[in-house]
């Protein structure tokens, strides 16, 4: 793998829109090199027989059937509201109309 240069780090910082000082650029050269080496090591793992998964533990999604059942009417839902208007909760305006 080619060695990272300070210019490479400055280019990446520019792409990410990160403003780095000269000292930070110099420090990041070493840090990014370590990260890239770690990624290269992980990429060498033997994964040919590994089944892709979304979670390391087997999970079962717990869902209920989508069945229509009785629910509150608008009047029942608004019964405890301090104020309502046109079958909706009425709350004080917090934003101007600008």
Image (cartoon, helix red, strand yellow):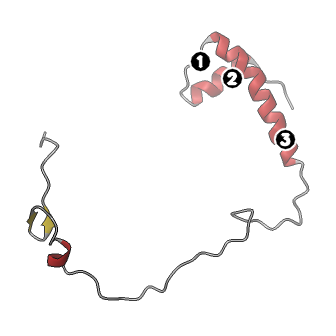
Q: With 49 as the anchor, is 55 left or right in this view?
A: left
Please give the label number shown on residue 9.
2
Q: Quadrant of the N terminus?
A: top right
Q: Is residue 63 above or below residue 25?
A: below
Q: Is residue 81 above or below residue 3?
A: below
State if disc 1 and disc 2 touch (CB < 8 Å).
yes
Tell me what residue is drawn at x 58 percent, y 25 percent: 14
* Local SS, label 3: helix
Tell me what residue is drawn at x 82 percent, y 38 percent: 38
Please give the label number shown on residue 20.
1
Task: Report the Cα–Cα distance between label 2 and label 3.
Answer: 18 Å
Q: Is residue 57 above or below residue 30?
A: below
* Local SS, label 1: loop
The 10 Å Cα crowd at callout 1, few under 14, some 14 to 19, many 20 or more, is some
Q: Position of residue 39 (x, y in %)?
A: 80, 41
Task: Report the Cα–Cα distance between label 2 and label 1.
Answer: 9 Å
Q: Is residue 85 above or below residue 25?
A: below
Of discs 2 and 1, which sits in the foreground? 1
Q: With 66 as the anchor, is 94 left or right in this view?
A: left
Tell me what residue is drawn at x 34 percent, y 89 percent: 69
- Residue labelled with disc 3: 40
The 10 Å Cα crowd at callout 3, few under 14, some 14 to 19, many 20 or more, is few
Task: Report the Cα–Cα distance between label 3 and label 1.
Answer: 26 Å
* Local SS, label 2: helix
- Work out whether mark 3 precedes mark 1 in sequence or the reverse, and give the earlier one: 1
Q: Which quadrant of the figure has residue 66? A: bottom left
Tell me what residue is drawn at x 13 percent, y 39 percent: 98
State if disc 1 and disc 3 touch (CB < 8 Å).
no
């Amino acid at each position: 793998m080619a060695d990272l240069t300070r210019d490479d780090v400055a280019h990446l910082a520019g792409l990410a829109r990160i403003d780095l000082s000269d000292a930070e650029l110099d420090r990041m050269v070493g840090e990014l090199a370590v990260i890239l080496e770690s990624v290269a090591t992980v990429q060498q793992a033997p994964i040919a027989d590994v089944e892709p998964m979304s979670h390391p533990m087997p999970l079962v999604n717990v869902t209920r059937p989508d069945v229509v059942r009785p629910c509150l009417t608008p009047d029942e839902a608004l019964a405890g509201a301090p104020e309502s208007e046109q079958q909706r909760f009425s709350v004080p305006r917090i934003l101007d109309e600008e």
